[in-house]
Image (cartoon, coloured by chain):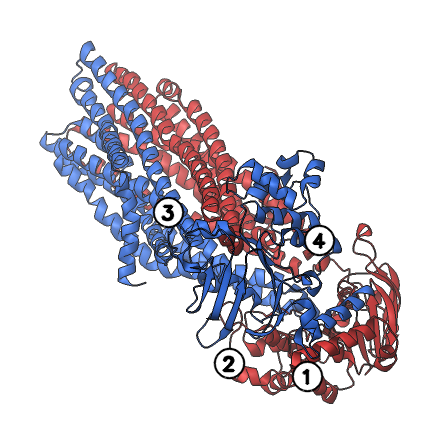
Chain colours: A blue, B red
Amino acid sequence: MSDNNRRGTFKLLSSYIYGDKALLTKASAFLVLATIADVLGPYLGKVFIDDYLMPRQFETQALVTLLLLYLGSQIAAAWLRYQQTMHFTTMALNAVQDIRQRAFKHVLKLPMAYFDHARTGQLVSRITNDTEAIKDLYVQFLSVVMSNLILLIGILIAMALLDLQLMLASALLIPTVMGVIFLYEKFSGPAVQQSRHLRSEINANISESIAGMSVLQASNQQPRFIEEFDQVNDDYYRARMRTIKVSALLLRPAIDLLSVSVLVAIIWMFGLQVTTGVAEVGVLYAFLNYLGRFTEPLAEVTQRFNLYQQAMVAGDRVHTLIEEGEQQYHDSPAQITSGHITVSALNFAYQTGKPVLHDVSFNLKPGELFAVVGHTGSGKSTLLSVLLNFYPTKEGTIRLDGQPLESFSHDNLRRGIGLIPQEPFIVVGSLRDNIDMGRNLPEAKLLQAAQQAHLTDTIRQLPDGLDTRLGEGGTRLSTGQRQQLVIARALAASPQILLLDEATANVDSETEQVIQRALRELHGKVTMIIVAHRLSTIKHADQILVLSHGRIEERGTHNELMQADAGLYRSMYQLQQQARRVQMLS
Amino acid sequence: MRLFRQLTWFFHANWRTYAIALLMLAGVALLNAALPYLIGQTIDRLLAEGALNPTVEYYLLTLLGMGALIYLLRVGWRLILFGTSYQLGGILRQRFYQRLTRLGPAFYSQQSTGDLMAKATNDIDAIELAAGEGVLSGFDGALTFVLVIAMMLFAIDWRLTVIALLPFPIMGYGFFRISRSVHQHFQESLERFSDLNNQTQQALSGIRLIKAMGREHHESQVFNKIADKAARCNYQVARYEALYEPVIYLCLTTSLLLILGIGGWLVWQDQLTVGKLASFTLYMGQLIWPMWAFGWLLNIIERGSAALKRVDVLLDTPDTIADHGTHTPTQPDLSIHNLSFAYDEKDGQILKGVHFNLLQGQKLGIAGPTGAGKTTLIQLLMRHWDSESGQILIDDHPLQALTLHHIRACFAYVPQDSFLFSLSIADNIALARPTASLEQIQHAAKVAALDEDIRHFPDGYNTQVGERGITLSGGQRQRLAIARALITDAPILILDDALSAVDVHTEQQILQHLRDDTQQRSVIIISHRLSAIEDADEILVLNHGEISERGNHTSLAQQDGWYSRMWTYQQMEAALDER
């Protein structure tokens, strides 16, 4: 990670701390007040012992005041502590929620090319796991580290007010504990890292063995793999024993030993004071009380610092992601009104030097049905992606209604072009949600689209009509019904242009009929481009474009193309007829 | 406590170590209980004598010595107790892994890898925690509680004790309630987190559709809602966790107030010394831990026993295939009689009345549409499943009479998509024969037409594959799997659609190599591409689990059946590809 990025990360993370000033001020105020009230308790105990108990003075009024003060301060301390913790937690959770939402929103706006290389699993982990690590940082750092540091300072001040000498003796604990923790970090660092490494080794080993179990068993290698697993398992045990050794020697027990030593030192110094006759036993009482709360914060604070490091690494990754450039859209008011498409001299390549589309040109009048066919890898799907403006084109132009494709705003472009993807994708929700897809379209439009897709009968038969739940745990639709649904979804926004990516896999005849009927009825009303795999579906197309290795090989209507003796289209058509003959026997 | 009963075998085997650790814990608790008392004594002595004196110095030295002793004991029990619980984790993981190697596809087809992983990691951790910290908090908490109360009652003042303890039941109850709520909300927050994961996963895998429909904004809103819920859940967890402190604080304050009040009055009456009052306050502080420990204990025991239950179910799963065979086949002649099979009665028969023979050195081709039962047939041959009707004989012995090891050793199986381990290329090829020499590995790679590719990799045969290495293409993976099969001496080679991702030219090259190479090996080739089985001695066409056509290529091509139609189709396709 470069320093620059580190600084960016730090700025990103700290901006949230200062972001809500009012909240920060409130939380800090609670923290300081809580600490004061907290520290007051033992102090009042000291006053009681030294001023009233030891000299045997019984002044009701003073004692009652003392009692009320004590009670009041302690109840206040409890309440203030709680408030402080919750305020800091709110800050932390708000920050993380915001980072999370920002990251997610940002990722969705990244250009399509980004997703060609990114691994989904890793991206998911950026948005969820890494932000979770940041959350731990905020919650821990803000509420634990800050409040413990302030408490420590508060105790030191109270101690100094009571007795400077004794306070200095107690304060010796701070460098000592820090030294011990330093030693701990030094010795445990490698051991902890090794045991973490072995742990992930074990996980990787198990998951790999599960995935490759049939291979393992088929090749009779179980004993060897068991032996290897045992080896890692043993190493892991030994590594953990090393970590526990270091932490047993240097953490809890050591810190407790230190506090006993300081206790002894304080009593001894108190003894010296007794000898010189300046001692007040109440002071000792207060110190004993304070000491009990002294070592805890120290240990907490020092131990949390490695959390900080982990979170910074996570923060770096999230920051890098957020800095990634979004896809830009114009915001001209131009809308797609008629559905006229002109593509001229289009060249396209994902990577320079590996062209996918060569010199593709065609002209589509509004309402025409246009089919693109060709082998896998001929560039059909790429043509669709380019028409959807998923990738910027450098050579050639695409014009919709005479305007360049890039000049449309995001919303107008998506409203004007509908897509029917290969896989009919159903979201968990009602049928209405599935047609509307969050676009908040008026009910009339939804119903009209449903009718155009011949879905009305289906809806009538469903138990709750449009409100029937679909997806996981809901009503299951047949493949044909799903296809109708997807068509209705695409039509609901009344697009001028409809892109249809036909499924490659075998489609049952019901689904095929659904598509056929929809195409026939929409013909003339909406400009349609269909990437077809089954040539039988596009017999009625106004134009058919045959792509081969990214170039236009043939073009014409079905009848024209079938005339060409050694034509590519004709051969493909015959091949599919043969496939049908094979199908009949399977 | 059922958890501890189920782990008795472990406690029993390690009772000495546990006994020593518990003794040490008891020592710590005793010394800890004595400390405040001694401090009180020291203070009283100091005040009584009015100056530092040898007795006080002696007391102080004793205190230091006790501190050191406590330190040593604490280090000791930690090493022993945690060490033993780590051992338990190790043993469980080991058993878990061994069990996994004895389970077959019948088991794995019903389990998700994620689930199994969770058992091997989180669940075993939870059990470990119960055996380590569970024992610790249970024993230490109880002991400290008893000792401290005893000291307060008998060494200091019983009246003061009774009064000072009044708020403690409230604290214990509070802890119990809080820990339950925290646990509950924590579970919920885990669920919300996985919702978050799911939504992100779903959105990112459907990014094309989202962009095409302009749903970015809507998806973000859905995500925001989930993130909001997750945050609210986390807030609830934090809220309950934050309650611990006020509860401790208020109860302790009330106690201290009562102590100062009543204790002060007792001091006044000369029935109590100031030193004892100080010790008493210190004891109060020591009581927080046991209260806390009980809540914690309930929690980890609950988690540990749920985890143990899940792990035990897995550890008790019987072997998928009972391995009771004793015979060793000498001749790899295969004969299948009237074989039928169904995974599940409901799903219907996958294979119906399949029969064929394969003598040593023969070549069998199997073709047919997807879902015809070809792979199932192979899995039955290798006894990954047992069939209820029909017979599979190797060297005239039914499979059940042979040892599993020998059955598997008969076959060199190449699946369509073979799994590569995170090892070097050479180790992956030599998987079934770790002792193979480099020459043998290279020879196998040459036959599989992979040698050339490997030489172009950065470290040649030592190149790592998998997560920390390079990614192989589908065709390279298939060829590696073939090399992996060839390196064994298994007498029957099975290619299960194992050439689907290589081009026709390479396919023919490999097949030619195989013809030149086979040392009297029998070969079964399942192939979608009929050119791969053209020269087989016999070809079976499987259709819906039944043999619909059989014969050699010439005879099948002459009928107007699935085979000849498919053959024509593939010829046309090849011609189209040539263009």
Q: Chain of mark 1?
A: B
For disc 2, the chain is B
Going by the picture, which residue comes out furthest to the top?
A: A60
What's the distance in space between the residues labelled 4 and 1, CA to CA? 41 Å
- Residue A217 visible? The answer is yes
> Please, what is the three-letter code of the amino acid marked with disc 3?
Ile
Q: Amino acid type of disc 1? A: Ile
Query: For this view, does B19 lie left or right of residue A9?
Result: right
Q: Nearer the viewer, residue A376 or B498?
A: A376
The x, y position of residue B266, in whole percent, is 28, 16
Please name the residue shown 78% across and 60% down the image: B322
The amino acid beneath tag 4 is: Thr
Labelled pair 4, 3 in contact (Cβ < 8 Å): no
Question: B444 and A407: which one is in front?
Answer: A407
Image marks 2 and 4: residues in contact by CB distance under 8 Å: no
Question: In the rendered image, which residue does mark 2 sit on?
Answer: B457
Q: Position of residue B497 (x, y in %)?
A: 71, 72
**Mark 3: which secondary structure?**
helix
Are tags 2 and 3 found on a single chain?
no
For the N terminus of chain B, the quadrant is top right
Quarter-of-image position of residue A573? bottom right
Q: Which residue is mark 1?
A: B510
Any mark on residue A511, and which?
A: 4
